Image: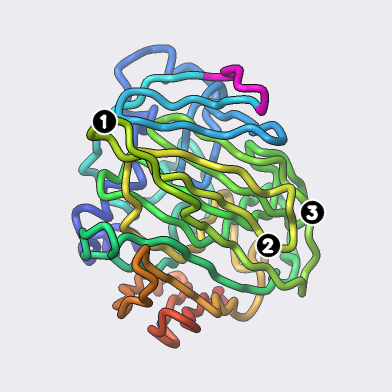
Amino acid sequence: MAFKLLATCALLAIQAWVSLANPLLSSTSDSVSEELVRTPGGLVPKSSVHAIPEGARIHHNSTHVQLIAADGSIIHSATTSKKISTRPKITGTPTSVAPRTLESGYVAYSYWHNTDNTTNGNIATYSTTWTVPPTPQRKDGQIIYIFNGLIPASFDGILQPVLQFGSTPAGGGNYWAVASWYLVGSQTYYTVPAQVKAGQSLTGVMSLMSTTLNGPTVSYHWKSVFTSVPSTAFTLSTTEVFNYAYEALEIYYASGPTDLPTGKTMMSNITISTVGGTHPALNWTAISDSVEGFGMSVVSSSSTNGAVQITYPA
Protein backbone atom coordinates (compact mmCIF):
# COMPACT_ATOMS: atom_id res chain seq x y z
CA MET A 1 0.00 0.00 0.00
CA ALA A 2 1.20 3.51 -0.78
CA PHE A 3 1.03 4.66 2.80
CA LYS A 4 3.13 1.76 4.06
CA LEU A 5 5.85 2.77 1.65
CA LEU A 6 5.72 6.33 2.92
CA ALA A 7 5.82 5.21 6.52
CA THR A 8 9.33 3.87 6.11
CA CYS A 9 10.50 7.42 5.39
CA ALA A 10 8.92 9.10 8.41
CA LEU A 11 10.62 9.72 11.73
CA LEU A 12 9.58 7.38 14.53
CA ALA A 13 8.37 10.32 16.57
CA ILE A 14 6.31 11.64 13.68
CA GLN A 15 4.93 8.17 13.12
CA ALA A 16 3.64 8.15 16.68
CA TRP A 17 1.28 11.10 16.30
CA VAL A 18 -1.54 9.80 14.11
CA SER A 19 -2.55 7.03 16.50
CA LEU A 20 -2.34 9.08 19.67
CA ALA A 21 -4.67 7.45 22.14
CA ASN A 22 -6.51 5.84 19.23
CA PRO A 23 -9.69 4.26 20.62
CA LEU A 24 -9.35 1.40 18.14
CA LEU A 25 -6.34 0.30 20.18
CA SER A 26 -8.25 0.39 23.45
CA SER A 27 -8.96 -2.84 25.26
CA THR A 28 -12.25 -1.56 26.64
CA SER A 29 -15.43 -2.75 25.00
CA ASP A 30 -17.00 0.72 25.33
CA SER A 31 -14.38 2.32 23.07
CA VAL A 32 -14.78 -0.37 20.46
CA SER A 33 -18.58 -0.42 20.44
CA GLU A 34 -19.10 3.35 20.54
CA GLU A 35 -19.57 5.27 17.29
CA LEU A 36 -16.25 6.55 15.99
CA VAL A 37 -15.88 9.81 14.07
CA ARG A 38 -13.18 11.29 11.81
CA THR A 39 -11.43 14.32 13.30
CA PRO A 40 -8.24 16.04 12.09
CA GLY A 41 -6.51 13.69 14.54
CA GLY A 42 -8.09 10.50 13.21
CA LEU A 43 -10.75 8.22 14.68
CA VAL A 44 -12.06 9.10 18.15
CA PRO A 45 -15.24 8.20 20.07
CA LYS A 46 -18.08 10.59 19.28
CA SER A 47 -18.58 11.28 23.00
CA SER A 48 -14.99 12.61 23.20
CA VAL A 49 -15.65 15.46 20.73
CA HIS A 50 -16.68 18.77 22.32
CA ALA A 51 -17.79 22.16 20.97
CA ILE A 52 -16.08 25.21 22.49
CA PRO A 53 -18.73 27.79 23.46
CA GLU A 54 -18.03 31.44 22.75
CA GLY A 55 -15.65 32.84 25.36
CA ALA A 56 -14.67 29.42 26.71
CA ARG A 57 -11.07 28.26 27.04
CA ILE A 58 -9.16 25.01 27.37
CA HIS A 59 -6.73 24.16 30.17
CA HIS A 60 -4.38 21.20 29.75
CA ASN A 61 -1.77 19.93 32.19
CA SER A 62 0.04 16.64 32.77
CA THR A 63 -3.01 14.91 34.25
CA HIS A 64 -6.18 16.61 32.99
CA VAL A 65 -7.73 18.60 30.19
CA GLN A 66 -10.65 20.92 30.98
CA LEU A 67 -13.08 23.00 28.96
CA ILE A 68 -13.80 26.10 31.04
CA ALA A 69 -16.72 28.47 30.37
CA ALA A 70 -16.39 32.26 30.24
CA ASP A 71 -17.79 32.46 33.80
CA GLY A 72 -15.12 30.05 35.11
CA SER A 73 -17.35 26.99 35.47
CA ILE A 74 -16.01 23.67 34.18
CA ILE A 75 -17.98 22.39 31.19
CA HIS A 76 -15.96 19.23 30.65
CA SER A 77 -13.01 17.51 32.33
CA ALA A 78 -11.07 14.39 31.40
CA THR A 79 -7.85 12.70 32.40
CA THR A 80 -5.02 12.70 29.89
CA SER A 81 -2.65 9.91 29.01
CA LYS A 82 1.00 10.00 27.98
CA LYS A 83 0.74 6.71 26.11
CA ILE A 84 2.27 7.07 22.65
CA SER A 85 1.63 4.60 19.86
CA THR A 86 4.54 3.32 17.78
CA ARG A 87 2.30 2.49 14.84
CA PRO A 88 3.24 4.20 11.56
CA LYS A 89 1.97 7.72 11.09
CA ILE A 90 0.74 7.07 7.57
CA THR A 91 -1.45 4.00 7.28
CA GLY A 92 -4.32 3.04 5.05
CA THR A 93 -7.81 2.98 6.50
CA PRO A 94 -9.05 -0.60 7.04
CA THR A 95 -11.60 -1.54 4.40
CA SER A 96 -14.02 -2.56 7.15
CA VAL A 97 -14.16 1.12 8.18
CA ALA A 98 -14.03 2.91 4.82
CA PRO A 99 -14.08 0.79 1.66
CA ARG A 100 -12.97 3.56 -0.68
CA THR A 101 -10.49 3.81 -3.54
CA LEU A 102 -8.10 6.42 -2.14
CA GLU A 103 -6.20 5.87 1.08
CA SER A 104 -7.27 7.90 4.11
CA GLY A 105 -5.24 10.05 6.48
CA TYR A 106 -2.36 12.46 6.01
CA VAL A 107 -1.82 12.18 2.25
CA ALA A 108 0.50 15.20 1.96
CA TYR A 109 2.28 17.11 4.72
CA SER A 110 5.42 19.01 5.70
CA TYR A 111 6.87 19.38 9.16
CA TRP A 112 9.64 21.32 10.87
CA HIS A 113 11.16 20.38 14.23
CA ASN A 114 12.34 23.24 16.42
CA THR A 115 15.39 21.85 18.22
CA ASP A 116 16.14 25.04 20.18
CA ASN A 117 15.08 24.05 23.70
CA THR A 118 15.88 27.38 25.34
CA THR A 119 13.05 29.59 26.58
CA ASN A 120 13.83 32.30 24.03
CA GLY A 121 14.01 29.67 21.30
CA ASN A 122 10.45 28.40 21.81
CA ILE A 123 7.94 29.06 19.03
CA ALA A 124 5.86 32.16 19.78
CA THR A 125 3.87 32.69 16.57
CA TYR A 126 3.06 30.52 13.58
CA SER A 127 0.90 31.69 10.70
CA THR A 128 0.07 30.50 7.18
CA THR A 129 -2.03 32.00 4.40
CA TRP A 130 -3.83 29.97 1.74
CA THR A 131 -6.74 30.27 -0.64
CA VAL A 132 -9.88 28.15 -0.28
CA PRO A 133 -9.65 25.60 -3.14
CA PRO A 134 -12.34 24.96 -5.75
CA THR A 135 -15.29 22.89 -4.56
CA PRO A 136 -14.83 19.21 -5.46
CA GLN A 137 -16.71 18.14 -8.58
CA ARG A 138 -18.21 15.13 -6.84
CA LYS A 139 -19.79 15.20 -3.39
CA ASP A 140 -20.34 11.78 -1.86
CA GLY A 141 -19.48 11.97 1.82
CA GLN A 142 -15.77 12.81 1.65
CA ILE A 143 -14.03 14.78 4.39
CA ILE A 144 -11.09 17.07 3.60
CA TYR A 145 -8.94 18.87 6.17
CA ILE A 146 -6.26 21.45 5.26
CA PHE A 147 -4.35 23.14 8.07
CA ASN A 148 -1.21 24.40 9.73
CA GLY A 149 -0.68 23.07 13.24
CA LEU A 150 1.59 22.86 16.28
CA ILE A 151 2.51 19.63 18.10
CA PRO A 152 4.50 19.06 21.33
CA ALA A 153 7.44 16.67 21.62
CA SER A 154 5.21 14.16 23.44
CA PHE A 155 3.03 13.90 20.31
CA ASP A 156 -0.05 13.66 22.51
CA GLY A 157 -1.90 16.61 20.96
CA ILE A 158 -2.20 19.21 18.21
CA LEU A 159 -3.40 22.83 18.02
CA GLN A 160 -4.67 23.75 14.56
CA PRO A 161 -6.77 26.25 12.60
CA VAL A 162 -8.48 23.97 10.06
CA LEU A 163 -10.20 24.42 6.70
CA GLN A 164 -12.66 21.58 6.16
CA PHE A 165 -14.96 20.23 3.47
CA GLY A 166 -17.75 17.78 4.25
CA SER A 167 -19.78 16.73 7.27
CA THR A 168 -17.24 16.45 10.09
CA PRO A 169 -17.75 15.82 13.82
CA ALA A 170 -17.80 19.62 14.20
CA GLY A 171 -20.59 20.01 11.63
CA GLY A 172 -20.46 21.28 8.06
CA GLY A 173 -21.68 19.83 4.78
CA ASN A 174 -20.92 20.03 1.07
CA TYR A 175 -19.13 23.35 1.45
CA TRP A 176 -15.88 24.75 2.82
CA ALA A 177 -15.78 25.93 6.44
CA VAL A 178 -13.17 26.94 9.03
CA ALA A 179 -12.73 26.19 12.73
CA SER A 180 -9.98 25.98 15.32
CA TRP A 181 -9.30 22.58 16.90
CA TYR A 182 -7.34 21.20 19.83
CA LEU A 183 -6.85 17.45 20.12
CA VAL A 184 -5.16 15.84 23.11
CA GLY A 185 -5.20 12.13 23.88
CA SER A 186 -8.65 10.90 22.88
CA GLN A 187 -10.30 14.28 23.61
CA THR A 188 -11.14 16.71 20.80
CA TYR A 189 -12.31 20.33 21.02
CA TYR A 190 -13.46 22.64 18.23
CA THR A 191 -15.06 26.01 17.53
CA VAL A 192 -18.28 26.00 15.51
CA PRO A 193 -17.35 25.89 11.79
CA ALA A 194 -17.94 29.09 9.81
CA GLN A 195 -18.69 28.74 6.10
CA VAL A 196 -16.22 30.24 3.61
CA LYS A 197 -16.15 30.40 -0.19
CA ALA A 198 -13.82 29.03 -2.84
CA GLY A 199 -11.24 31.68 -3.72
CA GLN A 200 -11.36 33.31 -0.29
CA SER A 201 -8.00 34.07 1.34
CA LEU A 202 -7.44 32.59 4.81
CA THR A 203 -4.72 33.12 7.40
CA GLY A 204 -4.49 30.61 10.25
CA VAL A 205 -2.55 31.97 13.22
CA MET A 206 -1.39 30.43 16.50
CA SER A 207 0.10 32.92 18.95
CA LEU A 208 1.70 32.52 22.37
CA MET A 209 -0.05 35.23 24.37
CA SER A 210 1.78 34.83 27.69
CA THR A 211 3.37 32.40 30.13
CA THR A 212 2.70 31.93 33.85
CA LEU A 213 4.67 30.18 36.58
CA ASN A 214 3.10 28.11 39.37
CA GLY A 215 5.96 26.76 41.44
CA PRO A 216 8.20 24.85 39.01
CA THR A 217 5.41 24.47 36.42
CA VAL A 218 5.25 26.80 33.43
CA SER A 219 1.94 27.24 31.60
CA TYR A 220 1.87 28.52 28.02
CA HIS A 221 -1.21 30.49 26.96
CA TRP A 222 -2.04 30.22 23.25
CA LYS A 223 -4.64 31.62 20.90
CA SER A 224 -5.73 29.98 17.64
CA VAL A 225 -7.77 31.86 15.03
CA PHE A 226 -8.39 32.56 11.37
CA THR A 227 -7.74 36.29 11.29
CA SER A 228 -10.72 37.11 9.05
CA VAL A 229 -13.14 34.87 10.99
CA PRO A 230 -13.24 35.96 14.68
CA SER A 231 -15.65 33.17 15.66
CA THR A 232 -12.82 30.65 15.15
CA ALA A 233 -10.82 32.07 18.07
CA PHE A 234 -10.22 30.27 21.34
CA THR A 235 -7.48 30.23 23.97
CA LEU A 236 -5.54 27.28 25.35
CA SER A 237 -3.28 26.98 28.37
CA THR A 238 -0.92 24.01 28.36
CA THR A 239 2.16 22.92 30.26
CA GLU A 240 3.69 21.49 27.08
CA VAL A 241 5.97 23.28 24.62
CA PHE A 242 4.96 23.13 20.96
CA ASN A 243 8.09 22.35 18.96
CA TYR A 244 6.80 20.75 15.75
CA ALA A 245 5.15 22.85 13.02
CA TYR A 246 2.96 21.17 10.39
CA GLU A 247 1.35 22.01 7.04
CA ALA A 248 -1.00 19.22 5.99
CA LEU A 249 -3.71 17.80 3.75
CA GLU A 250 -5.79 15.05 5.36
CA ILE A 251 -8.64 13.18 3.67
CA TYR A 252 -11.25 10.54 4.50
CA TYR A 253 -13.85 8.67 2.44
CA ALA A 254 -12.58 10.00 -0.91
CA SER A 255 -13.44 7.62 -3.76
CA GLY A 256 -11.25 9.28 -6.39
CA PRO A 257 -9.74 12.53 -7.69
CA THR A 258 -13.17 14.05 -8.44
CA ASP A 259 -13.86 13.99 -4.68
CA LEU A 260 -10.96 16.42 -4.22
CA PRO A 261 -10.11 19.94 -5.36
CA THR A 262 -8.26 20.33 -8.65
CA GLY A 263 -4.83 21.79 -9.20
CA LYS A 264 -2.68 22.96 -6.30
CA THR A 265 -2.95 24.75 -2.97
CA MET A 266 -0.09 27.05 -2.00
CA MET A 267 0.41 27.33 1.76
CA SER A 268 2.15 30.70 1.69
CA ASN A 269 3.36 33.59 3.83
CA ILE A 270 4.49 31.02 6.40
CA THR A 271 5.85 32.98 9.34
CA ILE A 272 7.41 31.52 12.47
CA SER A 273 8.95 33.62 15.23
CA THR A 274 10.39 32.72 18.62
CA VAL A 275 9.91 34.07 22.13
CA GLY A 276 13.21 35.89 21.68
CA GLY A 277 11.86 37.67 18.60
CA THR A 278 13.99 35.82 16.06
CA HIS A 279 12.93 34.04 12.87
CA PRO A 280 14.63 30.62 12.93
CA ALA A 281 16.06 28.84 9.92
CA LEU A 282 13.49 26.29 8.74
CA ASN A 283 14.27 22.87 7.34
CA TRP A 284 10.95 21.40 6.20
CA THR A 285 10.55 17.68 5.59
CA ALA A 286 7.94 17.04 2.88
CA ILE A 287 6.08 13.71 2.63
CA SER A 288 3.25 12.75 0.28
CA ASP A 289 1.48 9.79 -1.28
CA SER A 290 2.95 10.28 -4.75
CA VAL A 291 1.76 6.83 -5.86
CA GLU A 292 -1.81 8.13 -5.76
CA GLY A 293 -0.90 11.48 -7.28
CA PHE A 294 -0.60 13.68 -4.18
CA GLY A 295 2.34 16.03 -3.88
CA MET A 296 3.92 18.21 -1.20
CA SER A 297 6.86 20.40 -2.15
CA VAL A 298 8.83 23.06 -0.30
CA VAL A 299 8.77 26.27 -2.34
CA SER A 300 10.53 28.51 0.20
CA SER A 301 12.09 27.74 3.59
CA SER A 302 11.90 31.37 4.70
CA SER A 303 10.51 31.85 8.21
CA THR A 304 9.05 35.25 7.29
CA ASN A 305 7.48 34.47 3.91
CA GLY A 306 7.83 30.72 3.43
CA ALA A 307 5.70 28.45 1.25
CA VAL A 308 4.90 24.80 0.66
CA GLN A 309 2.64 23.51 -2.10
CA ILE A 310 0.00 20.77 -2.06
CA THR A 311 -0.76 19.05 -5.38
CA TYR A 312 -3.99 17.09 -5.88
CA PRO A 313 -4.32 13.99 -8.10
CA ALA A 314 -5.30 14.75 -11.68
Determine the image quadrant of residue 189. top right
| Disc 1 residue type (three-letter) | Gly
Residue range highlighted in magenta: 70-76
* Closer to us: 309 or 96: 309
Residue located beneath label 2 in the image: 227
- Residue 44 in percent (x, y) is at 47, 31
Q: Quadrant of the C terminus?
A: bottom right
Q: Amino acid at mark 3?
A: Gln
Residue on which disc 1 sits: 215
Q: Residue at x 50, y 83 (%)?
A: 305
Specify whether 29 is left or right of 68.
Answer: left
Quadrant in which residue 110 is drawn? bottom left
Residue 241: x and y in percent read 32, 49
Give the residue type that dot 2 points to. Answer: Thr
The secondary element bearing badge 2 is classed as loop
Q: Is residue 241 above or below residue 184?
A: below
Residue occupying the far top of the picture: 29
Please tell me the numbered disc located at residue 195. Answer: 3
Per the image, label 1 sits on a secondary structure element best described as loop
Residue 72 magenta-highlighted: yes
Is 232 left or right of 2, judged from the image as shown?
A: right
On-image quarter of the N terminus: bottom left
